[in-house]
């Protein structure tokens, strides 16, 4: 989706992310959790959500390849939390990088990776015996109220777009869960769907434009202009499927 890595987009989606993430999985994290590696941290919204739910002291090592986002994330972490930044691509991390981490986290990241990249990330977590909480991976399932006959067609085209360049897209959460199980982890998966609609008009409209835009790019033989115009003129209530995956190495 256009703008998915911009600070503006990440700020717009943060309230929906906060409401969607599984509190149950956060409560299941084995203690102590003192050192956390946050992968693809963006502006740090996951840290702002999770850090207050963990005992102090905490050290968050924020990893992202975008220097500007790293600076925002480090500046906005809750008071009393120690922060270090690590500017690099998360697919380059090794067992040595994760050794000593009590928890590896990410948010809205897995669907952007290939199967090989997710498998390698799972492998280095297993080698380091680092538990993982991977949140808000898209499932590809979207439900509208009211429905439109074209919803399914656009959903399918969007999901095809997400799988471009061998990326996992909506297959990511199930793939990651299976990979962690093969690596010997105890895995718990919970739904963490976004709830969009009239109470989040700006985010809903922006998400609709990105969702339909990606579908149109995937299927240029089809025209979705009238669909998008109708949906943004009278915003529907929308459930956008995501899953959170917790992996524990006992």
Image: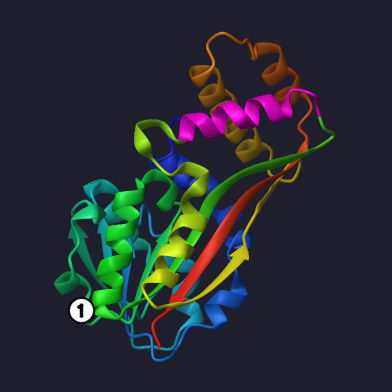
Q: Which colour scheme is used?
A: rainbow
Q: In the image, residue 36 lies at what x, y percent? A: 32, 75
Residue at the spot of label 1: 99
Q: Is residue 85 above or below residue 24?
A: above
Kind of element beneath mark 1: loop
Locate residue 149: give its quadrant: top right
Using a 10 Å C-alpha cutoff, classify the residue at mark 1 as few (fewer than 14 neighbours), some (14 to 19) or many (20 or more).
some
Instruction: Say whether residue 123 is left or right of residue 228.
Output: left
Q: In the image, residue 176 lies at what x, y percent? A: 44, 60
Q: In this view, does 230 lie above or below 135?
A: above
Q: Which residue is drawn at 30% across and 75% down?
A: 126
Q: Which residue lies furthest to the front in this view?
A: 182
**SS majority, magenta:** helix
Inspect this view and state whether residue 184 appears. Answer: yes
Q: Which residue lies furthest to the bottom in this view?
A: 32
Chain part drawn in magenta: 148-162
Q: Which residue is drawn at 56% across and 75% down?
A: 25
Q: In this view, does 124 lie above or below 114?
A: below
Q: Which residue is drawn at 63% across and 10% down?
A: 223
Q: Does the magenta stretch include residue 151?
A: yes
Q: In this view, does 134 lie above or below 30?
A: above
Q: In the image, residue 204 lies at what x, y percent? A: 65, 37
Numbered-mark total:
1
Q: Is residue 50 magenta?
A: no
Locate residue 198: give its quadrant: top right
Q: In the image, residue 142 lies at what x, y percent? A: 68, 41
**Closer to the camera in the image, 36 or 233:** 36
**Closer to the camera in the image, 220 or 47:** 220
Q: Residue at x 56, y 82 (%)?
A: 27
Q: Where is the C terminus found, in terms of image quarters?
A: bottom left
Q: Which residue lies furthest to the left in this view?
A: 96
Inspect this view and state whether residue 61 appears. Answer: no
């Amino acid at each position: 989706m256009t703008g998915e890595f911009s600070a503006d987009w990440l700020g717009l989606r943060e309230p929906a992310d906060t409401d969607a993430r599984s509190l149950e999985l956060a409560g299941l994290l084995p203690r102590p959790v003192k050192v956390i590696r946050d992968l693809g941290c963006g502006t740090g919204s996951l840290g702002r959500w999770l850090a207050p739910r963990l005992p102090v002291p905490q050290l968050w090592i924020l990893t992202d390849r975008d220097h500007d986002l790293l600076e925002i994330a480090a500046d906005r972490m809750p008071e009393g939390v120690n922060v270090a930044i690590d500017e690099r691509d998360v697919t380059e991390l090794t067992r040595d990088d994760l050794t000593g981490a009590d928890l590896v986290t990410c948010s809205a990241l897995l669907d952007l990776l290939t199967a090989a990249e997710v498998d390698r990330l799972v492998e280095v977590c297993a080698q380091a015996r680092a538990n993982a909480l991977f949140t808000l991976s898209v499932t590809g399932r979207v439900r509208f109220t009211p429905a439109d006959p074209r919803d399914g067609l656009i959903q399918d085209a969007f999901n095809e777009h997400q799988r471009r360049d061998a990326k996992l897209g909506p297959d990511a959460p199930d793939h990651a869960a299976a990979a962690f199980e093969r690596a010997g982890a105890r895995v718990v998966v919970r739904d963490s769907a976004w709830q969009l609609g009239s109470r989040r008009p700006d985010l809903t409209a922006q998400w609709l434009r990105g969702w339909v835009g990606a579908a149109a790019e995937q299927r240029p033989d089809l025209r979705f202009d009238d669909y998008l115009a109708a949906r943004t003129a009278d915003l529907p209530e929308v459930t956008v499927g995501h899953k959170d995956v917790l992996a524990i190495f006992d």
